[in-house]
Image (spheres, rainbow, N blue to C red):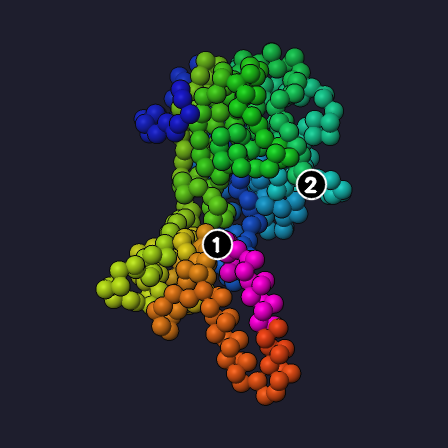
Amino acid sequence: MSEQNVEEEMNSNSAPTSDEQANGVITVVLTADNHLGYAAHGQSPRKRDERRERLRHAFQQATDFAVGQGVDLFIQAGDLFDTTSPDEQDRSFVATRLAQLRQAGIRAFALGGLHDTPAGSQAIPAPQISYARLGALHYFPPHASSTGAQTPLEPLIIDVRGTRVGICGLGVVPGEEGDPLAQLRVDSEIERAALSLLILHAPIEGQGADDLPEARALVRRSSLEQQSTFRYILAGYHHGFRRLQIGESEVVVAGATQHVDFNDPVDDPGFVFLGLAADGVRWCKHIAVDALQLHRLIIHTEELWPADEGEQVRPPAEIILERLRPLWNSDALIHLRFEGELTRSQYHQLDLNVVRRFGEENSFALSIDDSALSFLPEQQAVSAETGERFSPREELISLATEWIAQAQDEQERKALLITKEELLAALDGVRYPASRGGL
């Protein structure tokens, strides 16, 4: 199977039958990147609270589904929390959900993520450890390889209705470098398992991580192809669901249960329902949850200031709001991106404060990205008053000549003349490359 989403297969598979479970099919709910406690900067307290409640609700949909299906394993593959110090409301919420799973006889496993794993000089324990101490889940701490030691990764061997399942956890911590899978050694005890799982939380090459700085940890595709220990790799970190066949392994990326920021893929958030056997995947279904919807809108400056002078010129803000209107929704996260060249005068005509205010009133959140805008080189800019092209040199000469003519005495006139010549000399040595946004 090539690297692709297997929608047809996912849609055609149904819940496990008793025969399938009896024949060694292990049922799993896989979730990751729940980011409980996340709150965007700049939002009102009401919207921050609503966002946190939506995050909790999405995670509960995964636990409720697991209980309803009577699955064998519930796996959380990192970044359960958005911080190493979640508040009491989120801690208590997770405790209740884990108790629900335990009462239903479902074994829970968790791995730390980059957001909820203490690193460096932090003395606090990972928030998941308190649940592990109470027996509510099995927590896989960061592997010793993050400190440079190459101790073997020790698997947890469990029995699921007569099938021996070996589970390992491997995550990266903030500041870790290199490929965590490249030099990984696994204890030979994993060979006793009929079915081997690796829970992974790390960026994977080719899945949107290629632009990370070289110093960041990155699981290379070559490492995945060369390893033969794990039949299944169940991963977090990336916020979009993916199912991949790499080498001898099935790699399933859970995706996030809510859109966390505007860099997320537009795929529906959710969790994954799996049926795994020693000889292959029986089913792999991505289950969408109730979620805020992410929309992206790109507006080019040519749409706001048409090149055809015969067209009726409308206020740019009016055009922008007209383009946004079909996306207005109380559940919408809208990422508005501007692209193209414009003058400084045109930039101020965008009236982004008005656009931002309408966004706050008509959607859950609006993000405005002007990083792809650039100022026209001044030689190409057009005067808003006359419609004529001008250059900064011509403008400076004109302005200096006016000031010199208005000078009150000869000394002031000479000072202005010297200043004019110095500025022109400096200006002649300046180039005018297009500038990035944040204008």
Q: Give percent across and percent down for residue 281.
A: 43, 20
Kindly identify which residue carries mark 1.
434
Q: Is residue 45 left or right of residue 301?
A: right
Tell me the residue at 69%/40% (across/down): 118
| Disc nearer the start of the sequence (1/2) | 2
- The amino acid type, in three-letter code, at marker 1 is Ala
- The amino acid type, in three-letter code, at marker 2 is Pro
Residue 427 counted in the magenta span: yes
Residue 241 counted in the magenta span: no
Q: Is residue 291 left or right of residue 220?
A: left
Indicate the secondary structure of the residue bearing disc 2. Answer: loop
- Real-space CA distance between mark 1 and mark 2, rounded to the nearest whole angstrom: 42 Å
Residue 360 can be seen, yes or no:
no
Q: Residues within 10 Å of mark 2 (few under 14, many from 20)?
A: many
Tell me the residue at 70%/30% (across/down): 146
Indicate the secondary structure of the residue bearing disc 1. Answer: loop
Q: Is residue 223 left or right of residue 318?
A: right
The magenta segment is 419-439
298, above or below 200, in the image: below
- Callout count: 2
Residue 321's disc is none
Residue 118's disc is 2
Q: Give percent across and percent down for residue 249.
A: 50, 19
Which mark's residue is nearer the viewer, 1 or 2?
Answer: 1
Nearer the observer, 147 or 355: 355
Residue 386 can be seen, yes or no:
yes
Q: Give percent across and percent down for residue 7.
A: 35, 29
287, above or below 232, in the image: below
Q: Give percent across and percent down for residue 70.
A: 46, 29
Q: Quadrant of residue 168?
A: top right
